Image (cartoon, grey):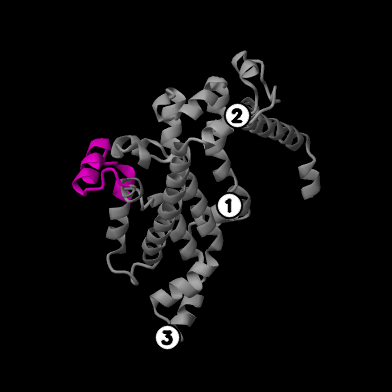
Amino acid sequence: MNNKLAKSFGDRIFLVVDYIVLLTVSLTCLLPMVHVLALSFSDSVSAASNSVLFIPKGFNLAAYDTMFSNPIFLNAFFVSIYRTIVGTAINLAVTVIAAYPLSKENNELRGRKWISLFFIIPMMVSGGLIPNYLLVKNLNMMDTLWSLILPGCLPIGNVVLMMNFFRGINKSIFESAEIDGANDFTILFRIALPLATASIATITLFQMVGHWNEWFGATIYINDRNKWPLQTLLRQMLTNIDYSSFGAESLGKLRLLSDRSFRGAMIVFATVPILCVYPFMQKHFVSGIAIGSVKE
């Protein structure tokens, strides 16, 4: 019966349209990246004449050589790595610590409804840019990486996702552990978290991508250019290449390059590291979202 329904005319039309839409969306995402990659490996004449499409012309690595010989890019890269690792670790810790108590029933956590309301209101009504700036300034976090990590260290959406996952675990497992003398910390770290691998992997991916791609905060809170993450530096360089940060040797190489090749190399340099994370997280992604989104 199911096979006959799957082979019906309407299902076939839907399947064809589905494939066309997915293929179009995939190509829309993939082709610009292939073009930028080809541009970054092309010589200055081909790049400047806009004759490069998806295959490099006059293959050379001059753009990458120029970029890696400039310490400001490597410094920004390590700042981004540091921010991503530390920020993601803090996000995960705070999210788990907030979500586990909220997954309890009302009779197990006194005031649970009010605590949940306390979390939900900031999610619905943001304080705005100026109050956030004043808060960061008064906490003496200006020109520090903590200004990029701590203000958003508790994403409420991830708390809800994690809370729903904890609520989906069979309560009898927790009750058995309590009978054996386990306290809440033991149950959380030795039972709940090992069962939450898919949800934790999903949240980790969300946070890593968020920290890696975020650039706006540093333009507001960090004046010292040496503390900018890679994305902020990239945005600055893409809109207006500042040659003051280049040494004499780099300037000599840069004169032989097209700006388009150099900008392409910067985009690839900023994109590839986070793409390397996806293959390790992707297998948990769908199950983590599906499990955490179920609400009973």
Up the image or down, 160 lies above or below 54; here it is: below
**Residues packed near mark 3 inside 10 Å, few (<14), some (14 to 19) or many (20 plus):** few
Instruction: Identify which amino acid the numbered label 1 is placed on.
Output: Phe
- Which segment is the magenta one? 120-144
Question: Residue 279: percent from the left, percent from the top?
Answer: 63, 50
| Residue 62: mark in rendering | 2
In the displayed structure, 34 sits above or below 135; it is above
Q: Quadrant of residue 6?
A: top right
Q: Earlier in the sequence, mark 1 or mark 3?
A: 3
Q: Which mark is residue 181?
A: 3
Residue located beneath label 1 in the image: 285
Can residue 86 be seen here?
Answer: yes
User: What residue is at 45 percent from the left and 75 percent from the top?
Assistant: 187
Q: Nearer the viewer, residue 143 or 252?
A: 252
Q: CA distance from mark 3 to mark 2?
A: 64 Å
Q: Considering only order in the chain, which callout, 2 or 3, is on the residue closer to the N terminus? A: 2
Rendered residue at 51%/59% (across/down): 200
